[in-house]
Image (cartoon, helix red, strand yellow):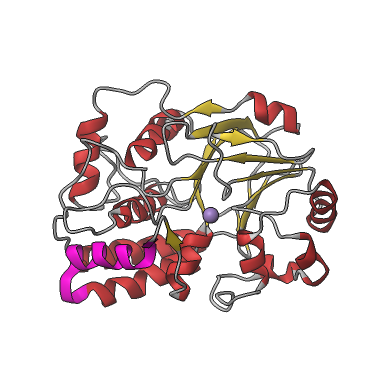
Amino acid sequence: MTEPGQRPSASPRDADRTIALLRQAVGASLADRYRRGCVAHLPSLGDVVVAGDLHGNRINFIRLLKVADLKHHPDRHLVLQEAVHGGPSSGGGGCLSYILFEALAALKVRHPDRVHILIGNHEMAEHMEQIIFKDGVVLNRAFDQGMTEAYGHRREEVRVWYRKFIESMLAACRTEHRLFISHSTPDGRWLPTFDLGLFDHPRLSDDFQRDSSLYNLIWGRDYRPETADGFAQLVEAEVFLVSHTPTPLGYEVPNHRHVIIQSYDDAGSYVLLPLDRPVSQAEIVASVRRVLTDRHPDDTVTLAKLDGEPQAEGFGSGETPEGSG
Ligand SMILES: [Mn+2]
């Protein structure tokens, strides 16, 4: 998941500015007009771009913003997930995915009712300080190192607000036509005790423990048809659009209900779906596109702005935040 030649310098960031941004992002998340409990109920109008795990890939994030083009599509929504862990490192070995994490916060401030951020297990692990390894590297430690390079002795102050932002994320998005979008779905053995009350929680504060329903929702990797049917019945859905499981081709169709997509590497993919009618699993699969199909020459300019400081005023577009009405 490295991006050769696109390695940003680990420049120090202004802790006060970041905290102010995160505070705004938490407010925007909780005031999202489509939010009930910790679920965004998308309206039966317009369309939605859904991305899978981003894992620090800033280039794919920038491409997704261009693809979604929210400015010119007032009835379009954008669903994003799992920014932290992965992507490029600083010279000092710090994980730079905090840049993307803060960019999601900035985007939520800019489009409070149309950008919806799903919680992934890596955000949950950061919140819980639960160690996650990948390829022999402790991802949390690398993430910590990146934050130390950016914020120095103020790292813990910023981290408090990282936690609050994570608590304000969504457990799921759903459409009026029985499409359920979440980071993952629970394993079969967790279904009998799965607490649907999770989705009524106004924010995810008491859910950060092992074997909570949130934990089981976003860590699950059980794609057996009978498990999919069981959860579909439980949440009254037809089709599940998830991420979480690596898919070398960008997407995968493991059973008759799930479509898995990821957005973190060159095969990274997204879907664009209408919201005003039901979409079948086959239609979702047919709509899968690669994020990088058409890169733009100005991507690197946008990237430089992203790496500079997080800001809600947009990434080089000169746009101002939308009202939250
Ligand atoms: Mn995951």
Residue 65 visible in the displayed image: yes
Residue range highlighted in magenta: 137-154
Q: Going 39% across and 45% down the picture, which residue do you hit?
A: 322
Q: Is residue 310 above or below residue 145?
A: above
Q: Which residue is rendered at x = 14% and y = 55% of the image?
A: 11
Instruction: Indicate the position of residue 4 as horizontal and vertical percent values.
Output: 25, 36
Residue displayed at 62% across by 41% down: 260
Question: Is 122 above or below relative to 69?
Answer: below
Q: Where is residue 309 in the image (x, y as percent from the top left)?
A: 20, 52
Residue 279 visible in the picture? no
Relative to residue 65, is residue 286 drawn left or right? right
Q: Where is residue 9 in the image (x, y as percent from the top left)?
A: 15, 49
**Percent x, y of residue 231:** 79, 55
> In the drawing, does residue 176 fall left or right of residue 106?
right
Let me know if residue 144 is in the magenta part: yes
212 sits to left or right of 128: right
In depth, the one of 155 and 73 nearer the eye is 155
Tell me if residue 195 comes above or below residue 298 in the rendering.
below
Residue 206 occupies quadrant: bottom right
Quadrant assignment for the N terminus: top left
